[in-house]
Image (cartoon, grey):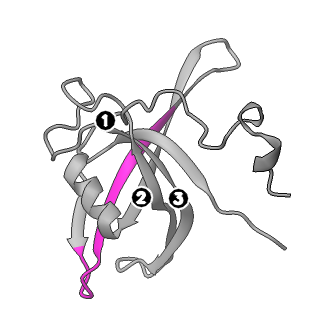
Amino acid sequence: MPSYNRVILMGNLTRDPEVRQTQSGTMVCRFSIAVNRSFTSGDGSQRDETCFIEIDSFGRTAENIGKFFSKGKPILVEGRLRQDSWDDKNTGQKRSKLLVVLERFEFVGSPRGGADSYDQGGDYERSTPPSRGPRQSQRPQADDMEDDDVPF
């Protein structure tokens, strides 16, 4: 039976990212985000619900998260769910939790100067590609061709 494991979340970091390096040299970054949901309850009052999600990232992505993000910064993440299991050292009970393994992220908010600025951690600057103007076709139009130009 086919399955699908994809998560897309947007929220704010609840703490500074923790970056470390494995014995094999791979960079690992763990951070968590808070994702809020506002809704109207049955009695008509406005309510808020917050989910706290742990996220792991690896390699160059882990380095970038550690460099450009800090507590309170917004982020959009895309990844997959993974379930970690372990034995609790104090009680001996089996424990587990779900977390997101980051595959892709995007900056959210203003790149410089605002409350959601990314300027204290590195050299991130948002840029727009230069305008190319209207696209011009390189192929000759039918009006420009004469009967001798047709290859068949």
Image quarter of residue 128: top left
Q: Residue 35: within the magenta?
A: yes
Give the residue pinned by disc 2. 55
Give the residue pinned by disc 1. 127
Q: CA distance from mark 2 to mark 3?
A: 9 Å
Image quarter of the N terminus:
bottom right
Q: Residue furthest front?
A: 148
Q: CA distance from mark 1 to mark 3?
A: 25 Å
Using the image, determine if residue 10 lies above or below residue 131: below
Tell me the residue at 35%/30% (across/down): 109
Amino acid type of disc 2?
Ile
Tell me the residue at 42%/56% (across/down): 54
Amino acid type of disc 1?
Ser
> In the rendered structure, which segment of residues is drawn in magenta?
21-36
Would you call the spot at circle 1 few (<14 residues within 10 Å), some (14-19), or many (20 or more)?
few
Image quarter of the C terminus:
bottom right
Q: Position of residue 64 (x, y in %)?
A: 27, 56
Magenta-colored segment: predominant secondary structure = strand
Frontmost residue, 19 versus 60: 60
Pointer 2 with pointer 3, Cβ within 8 A: yes
Quick check: 18 left or right of 76? Answer: left
Q: Position of residue 37 (x, y in %)?
A: 54, 30
Q: Position of residue 142 (x, y in %)?
A: 77, 36
Mark 1 and mark 3 lie on one chain; the one further toward the N terminus is 3
Give the residue pinned by disc 3. 79
Using the image, determine if residue 88 lies above or below residue 73: below
Q: Residue 95: within the magenta?
A: no
